Image: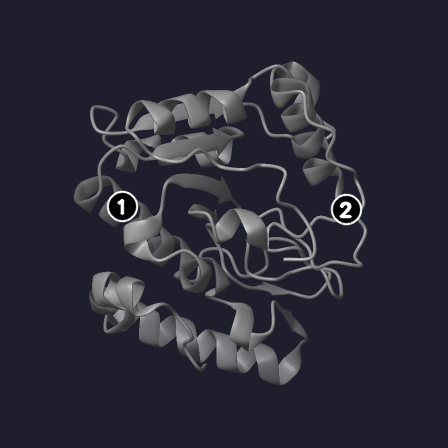
Amino acid sequence: MAVKIHPSWYAVLQPQFEAPYFAELKQFLVAERQQYTCYPPGSKIFNAFDHTPFDKVKVVILGQDPYHEPGQAMGLCFSVPDGIAVPPSLVNIIKEINSDLGTAIPLTSGNLTGWADQGVLLLNATLTVRAHQAGSHQRHGWEQFTDAAIRELSARRHGLVFLLWGSYAIAKKAFIDAGKHLILTAPHPSPLSAYRGFFGCRHFSQANSYLQQQGLAPIDWTRIGQA
């Protein structure tokens, strides 16, 4: 497994790469790829870390699993490449942005690389998945790795915004210092739960207000597609 990750993140996470659990995780992934199609492609596994250097992170959005159908997963949570149909959860995210900010983002692309390049870490808890089998790579070490990334951000950085949607993401509050960072929680944006409080949460305007209070540039949430 070739690791393509920004040097700033490699320096922070090097103890994880050298830990016994990560060696076991690599062995698991090698065996999986010998038997099954897995997503995302190897070069995209650490895409979130590669696009958003450790010292440039402003906002963290936590997902659970990569998309598990062909052409979807690109190493950024909730994001799909240009030309791929926008998944239902991301449709709802875009609807909430438009409602919150008065924008008119079209539902024509789900490529969120433009967010990542502005400092939005789009982090899935599990970074790989077997084709057509959601959750198939959970509990093999990825969660320990990504939890370490969250802990390091909380400890070493100050004034980040964590957007935690759904019970799985909200549980990660345990690793985040609420005295140093803004933590915003809401139900998951999936069609099953978006109407229970994701719609109307106004997380995007709140995140930008918080960043601006610290003298930082807000996120241009309209930068979706053709990144």
Residue lying at 37% horizontally and 36% vertically, measured from the top left:
172
Of labels 2 and 1, earlier in sequence is 2
Query: Tag 1's secondary structure?
Result: helix
Corner quadrant of residue 208? top left
Q: Residue at x 32, y 46 (%)?
A: 150
- Which of the pair 3/107 is nearer the observer? 107
Local crowd size for mark 1, using a 10 Å CA cut-off: few (<14), some (14–19), many (≥20): many
Label 2's element? loop
Q: Amino acid at mark 1?
A: Leu
Q: Position of residue 73 (x, y in %)?
A: 65, 60
| Residue at the disc numbered 1 | 153
Question: Is 3 on the left-hand or right-hand side of 196?
Answer: left
Q: Residue at x 41, y 60 (%)?
A: 49
Q: Is residue 147 above or below residue 204?
A: below
Residue 130, image x and y in percent?
64, 66
Q: Quadrant of the N terminus?
A: bottom left
